Amino acid sequence: MHIDGLRERHDESVAKEGVFDEAVAAIKEAKRRGFRVTTNSTFFNTDTPQTVVEVLNYLNDDLKVDEMMISPAYAYEKAPDQEHFLGVEQTRELFRKAFAGGNRRRWRLNHSPLFLDFLEGKVDFPCTAWAIPNYSLFGWQRPCYLMSDGYVSTYRELIEETDWDRYGRGKDPRCANCMAHCGYEPTAVLATMGSLKESLRAMRETVSGPQG
């Protein structure tokens, strides 16, 4: 379920009043019927650490959703509003402050520890766009769902015929401020699986679960 803020902020984000209340009602009904509910929240440069904390507290503590995903907004080409996207340093500062005071440990976040480290600027990663590809009626989208450099008809074509080395921060200027989970969470997961230390850390945090 897509929740980008509390009532006023979410409805402004989707440009339609009443959507927040409908989403909350749907979450409550899904929980009542026994479904697991995961939310996705995108944050913009109009957000503050406090607004991040407020919406995640509400989802975690009041609605008691099972898991939450978070991502900094990215100024992809087709976005109608190009003014309210976060830069890399803004993203790191926003999440570093929002995660302070034990919040990161307490919230039921559906992310690897290394991706959360990445958001805070503790580590840096290249993008792994091919790991979470986008498929639609048009076909497989190159290189990711946020950028459209054409479509191919098969996944094999996407993987084998796309010049992946062209993309990512420092390579393609369109990628300069992107820290979206669709590209960087896969890299974090691969880095976790390639490290015994990080694998044990991820297992420990999964088993112990969030506090509170």
Image: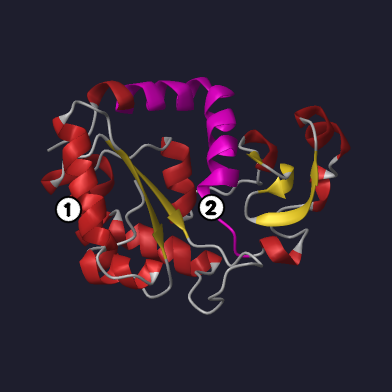
Residue 39 screen position, x and y as percent? 33, 44
User: Which of the image's four quarters has the C terminus?
Assistant: top left
Q: Which residue carries the number 1 mark?
A: 58
Q: Would you say residue 48 is visible in this rendering?
A: no
Asked which secondary structure carries label 2, the reply is loop
**Image mark for residue 180:** 2
Would you say the magenta stretch is mainly helix, strand or loop?
A: helix
User: Measured along the vertical axis of the image, is residue 78 above or below residue 195?
Assistant: below
Residue 84 screen position, x and y as percent? 48, 75
Question: What is the crowding at mark 2: few (fewer than 14 residues within 10 Å), some, or many (at least 20)?
Answer: some
Q: Residue at x 28, y 21 (%)?
A: 207
Q: Is residue 81 left or right of residue 209?
A: right
Give the amino acid at mark 1: Tyr
Q: Is residue 204 magenta?
A: yes
Residue 73 screen position, x and y as percent? 49, 62
Q: Residue at x 65, y 46 (%)?
A: 127
**Image mark for residue 43:** none
Q: Is residue 150 left or right of residue 27?
A: right
Q: Residue at x 63, y 55 (%)?
A: 146
Q: Residue furthest front?
A: 137
Give the amino acid at mark 2: Ala
Question: Front-most of 178 and 197?
Answer: 178
Asked which secondary structure carries label 1, the reply is helix
Residue 129 screen position, x and y as percent? 67, 43
Q: Which residues are magenta?
A: 177-205
